[in-house]
Amino acid sequence: MPALPDGDLDDLTPEQLAARWEEEKPPAAGALANAASSLVVLGVGVGAVILSLAMGLGTPAAPQPGLWPFMISCVMVVLGLFQLVIGRHNRDAEKFTRMSMAPLTGLVTLALMVALMPTIGFELPALALCIVWMRFLGSETWRSTLVVSAVVVGAFYGLFVLALNTSIPHLF
Amino acid sequence: MDFLNPVINGFAVVLEPTNLLYCLVGVVIGMLIGVLPGLGPAATIAILLPLTYNVEPVTAIIMLAGIFYGAQYGGTITSVLLRLPGEASSVVTVFDGYQMARQGKAGTALGLASIGSFVGGTASIIGLTFLAPIVAGFALDFGAPEYSALALLGILLVATISSGAKTKALIAAALGLLLATVGRDVFTGESRFTFGSLELADGIDFVPIAMGIFGLGEILYNLEERHRAAKAPSKVANVWPSRGDLKQAAGSIGRGSILGFFLGILPGGGATISSMASYAMEKKRAKQPERFGKGAPEGVAGPETANNAAATSSFIPLLTLGIPANATMALMFGALLIQGVTPGPQLVEENPDLFWGVVNSMYIGNILLLIMSLPLVGLFVKILRVRAAILAPVTALITLLGAYTINNSMFDVTLVVVFGVIGYLMKKFGFEPGPLVLAFVLGSLLESSLRRSLLVFGGDPMGFFGRPISATLLAVFVLVAVLPGIRSMLAKRKASAVAEPGTVQIKEKV
């Protein structure tokens, strides 16, 4: 990433600087995202209420296993409802932007690694993960990507397999 | 001076080569992650939790503590040189530190900050040495009702003082409590929320949750964040502040130590809040407040002193009451539990080696950090050139492989990834992850002491108000819970016409 022209930035007062940071933050998400997150909370809460009821509540003096989860999930439902109504216009949620593809890609590589590690060992998935993260998510050059990835996987092999002798599934 | 005997024995523990080595490792890692924007101390500690399985409890905590207070030192460097706060607790340092750097006094700013950090940290350790046994002695009489009230209050305070929306933080805390109930019910032996899974029968381990939510969640979140451009300066000259500078900053270092110490003890307090409070206090006290923001040495020395003092004193509630005051302390709590040590008032008496070993290791750690941040500062400035693109996959791999080594099970790795996604989404939607982890750690303690007290009271919840300490704690709880609502209602009624001044919220990095 190119360096920002620094000259005009240097004379900002703390307040201006803070305001600038505020601007640079990812865009805030709208009411829909807030409502959706509240609904997820409500869903989890209601689900937990039902499951706790099924476990049995008992009395405060002789509680069944469900009493404590029931209390927490009731609090959660109340908070979820409150958030749904009052927190509608909060601006603390972030919008998903084109940049959000990066964590998604990252997640896919992580999931693949978890899926492949037991069958083909950690080396090749780890190498692939490094290459994807450095070249495509981090825009490193191909040369430095390949060199650094190989070194990193080699170092992990040395550390976890040769030095610490852990039972991490490995191919070689 | 019988009281001092265990203190001196503690030094013997620290001076064992292994412990010294881990202390050094801890503070170097802390310094590094402080310098590198990206991961914060909590995320780093979470990722490194598997490392602590094979060492003695005291060694493990010495290292983790070193990471925590080391990060406070390191965060300053990027604030001053690049105007990028390496840690949330160094944000205010940017205002005057960077201006000092522009005036060619970068070295002075860094020097003042390290000396202030050292003084604040050391003063705080001395305070900890004297205050902690007293608090622990007082808390020895606590029974189940007091613990329920204390845990409830701790969770509430951490949730409401956090930087984001309070309702969302409370929701996160409730989710944490709920996750803590997964597994076998200790009282009846029945399974809860396991959905027939054998792996969940013993409950969810703390480590995968912490590694996922703090570690991987943070890594995924950082992938998206456009890193502000930075160019590292080639070298920093003259880090030794002059006598005049020191004299000018001495007052703010003294005030910062005291302020930081007390704010650090409070649940929900800690390094970030105390650095901000110290900056505000210095500005208010100054004869020429207009100098602030233009390179006032007090604006660097005060906050940097305060954040270090607070980082140290936040160990007091953890080591004496068994109640973590912030998210990082929740991780320490978890690390101790893994080692079979339950932090609480009995710790000073039953485990003096651990208690005083950890406390005294901070003296050594602070001296090491002073050395690293004065003569060796150039070395750490060079590290700024390591690119985030290279660091991200390395930390992700450390997390996954580390998670595997805990129990040699892929299930833990899967859990880490799942909680990583949850942590990422929580950050995206404005839910603080800290309260979740804290509530999860305290969840089983809270449930068991609540149920035990209700047994004692014969099922009557009013029994909590029949005991002075639990009644006071619960009264504070109600006050904290209700006060913001009343205040905002009053404010709305009074000044609906007056436009609210734009407040700045800096997202806390964990």
Image: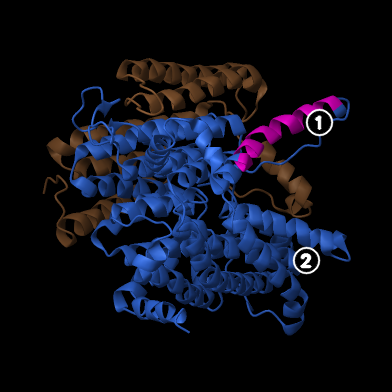
| Hue used for the chain lettered A | brown
The disc numbered 2 marks a residue on which chain?
B
What residue is shown with label 1?
B491
Residue B81 position, x and y percent, is 63, 62
On residue B231, which mark appears? none
Give the alpha-carbon distance from disc 1 to disc 2, as whole Å.
35 Å
Q: Is mark 2 on a helix, strand or loop?
A: loop
Residue at image location 42% in from the left, 43% down from the top = B442
- Which element carries disc 1, helix, strand or loop? helix
Magenta segment's dominant SS is helix
* Residue B408 or residue B233, whichever sits in front: B408
Magenta segment = B475-493
Spot occupied by residue B402 in the image (x, y as percentages of width and height): 27, 49
Residue B490 is covered by the magenta coloring? yes
Between residues B192 and B187, which one lies in front from this camera angle?
B187
Where B159 sits versus A8, above or below? above
Residue type at the position of mark 2: Ala
Q: Colour of chain B?
A: blue
Q: In this view, does B361 lie to the left or right of A34?
A: left
In the image, taking residue B200 as reference, residue A77 lies left or right, namely right
Q: Where is residue B77 in the image (x, y as percent from the top left)?
A: 58, 64
Q: Where is residue A61 in the image (x, y as percent from the top left)?
A: 39, 29
Identified at 69% across, 61% down, the residue is: B98
In the image, which disc is placed on residue B296? 2
Q: Dot 2, how many residues are within 10 Å of its Cα: few (below 14), some (14-19), or many (20+)?
A: many
Is B269 located above or below residue B194 in the figure?
A: below
Above or below: residue A48 compared with residue B387: above
The structure residue drawn at horizontal position 62% and vertical position 40%, both measured from the top left corner, is: B475
Chain containing mark 1 = B
Tell which circle, 1 or 2, labels the residue nearer the N-terminal end: 2
| Residue B230 appears in the picture as rendered | no
The amino acid beneath tag 1 is: Ala
